Image: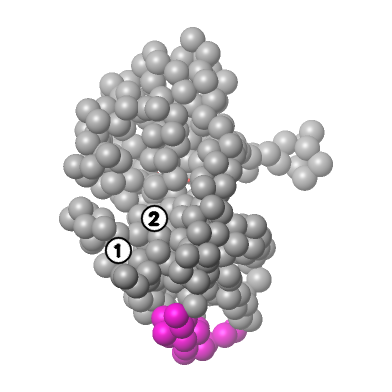
Amino acid sequence: MAARIIDGKQIAADIRAELKKTIAQLVADHGITPGLGVVLVGDDPASRSYVTAKERACAEAGIYSDDNHLPADATQAELLAIVERMNQDPKIHGILVQLPLPSHIDESAVLLAIDPDKDVDGFHPVSVGRMVIGEKAFLSCTPHGIIQLLQRSNVQLEGAEVVIVGRSNIVGKPLANMLIQKWDKGNATVTVCHTRTKNLSEHTRRADIVIAATGRPNTITADMIKDGAVVIDVGVNRVDDPTRKRGYRLVGDVDFGPVAEKASLITPVPGGVGPMTITMLLYNTVDSAKATIQPG
Ligand code: NAP
């Protein structure tokens, strides 16, 4: 069997088009323009390009963005003052502090300072706690993006055996918690694996859906999945490639070619999970703006 490709770029574009309509309606009917406050500290090239992509995505969708770029030696107090100003600003519905922060700044103190009602990254402990107990919460963007990819590809989640490989706070743990909820995005039976898991392939071979989020190329090989499994590859890894002008190429955590021969559906890298993360950030920002509509 040759797997169908889950086209993350197309699904992300579909969601962004839906959001654009919702935003136009929010402006027309309620005079509300969703606003995202972004803070970047320092000049890390990866963070800078990520933030630029977020700002561009906001502009394309019609979201107002308040961009704050601070030098690498900015103090924690300066950063907290910006967060506090954005907490109070009614034009800002979502706040995003780009991680990682320079080592002299206490990352968790900064994340805790964000008003949970504007925590569109979904990393604040209040957001995580609300999600885990099944209350309405901002869902963190990469795991929520993965669920959207599955749902929009008509993959049945209810009753599915899902094996997630990786237990980070940004992917594995929140994703597992979303997928076990008693709701339309969940009702799956979830196993979370990691480096101390015994016989990883015994778990993955059982799975209807395998989700790899390890940051290691070839963690999932064809012998580790069952025929017809759905495979989601979250990994983004650089491997040397002298044939490319830039000297490397991006690969995921899955041995794509052989696994695609056996799977029924698979995400590519790039072009799978990646485009969904920023899209779900826009989604959360619009959701937050909607919550400010006054009744009547
Ligand atoms: P992370 O914090 O490094 O966590 C990796 C997890 O994978 C850990 O739980 C680790 O287990 C587990 N692991 C590593 N090697 C393993 C192996 N051989 N067998 C079983 N488990 C293994 O990584 P992350 O932040 O979750 O990111 C994972 C990957 O996703 C990275 O490539 C990252 O770039 C990518 N990512 C992509 C997006 C996107 O938008 N596309 C977003 C986030 C992350 P232990 O806990 O035991 O160490």
Amino acid type of the residue that numbered disc 1 sits on in the rendered structure:
Ser
Q: Which residue is pictured at 23% across the width and 61% down the height?
A: 129
* Residue 121: quarter of image: bottom left
Between 160 and 70, the one lying in front of the other is 160
Q: Which residue is pictured at 22% across the width and 28% down the height?
A: 159
Check whether the beta carbons of the residues at disc 1 and disc 2 lie within 8 A of each other.
yes
Q: Residues within 10 Å of mark 2 (few under 14, many from 20)?
A: many
What is the C-alpha distance between the residues marked 1 and 2? Answer: 9 Å
Res. 167 visible in picture: no
Between 3 and 93, the one lying in front of the other is 93
Between 208 and 64, the one lying in front of the other is 64
Q: Quadrant of the C terminus?
A: bottom left
The picture places residue 232, in percent across and down from the top left corner, at 45, 33
Task: Find out whether residue 80 is within the magenta segment.
Answer: yes
249 shown above or below 132: above
Q: Which residue is pictured at 56% across the width and 54% down the height?
A: 20
The picture places residue 254, in percent across and down from the top left corner, at 50, 30
Residue 158 horizontal side relative to residue 50, left or right: left
Counting labels gives 2
Q: Residues within 10 Å of mark 1 (few under 14, many from 20)?
A: many
Q: Which mark is residue 140?
A: 2
Between 273 and 291, the one lying in front of the other is 291
The picture places residue 12, in percent across and down from the top left corner, at 54, 43
User: Along the polypeptide, which appears first: circle 1 or circle 2?
Assistant: 1
Residue placed farthest to the top in the image? 1
Res. 57 visible in picture: yes
Amino acid type of the residue that numbered disc 2 sits on in the rendered structure:
Ser
Disc 1: which residue: 127
Q: Which residue is pictured at 40% across the width and 15% down the height?
A: 228
Start-end of magenta stretch? 73-90
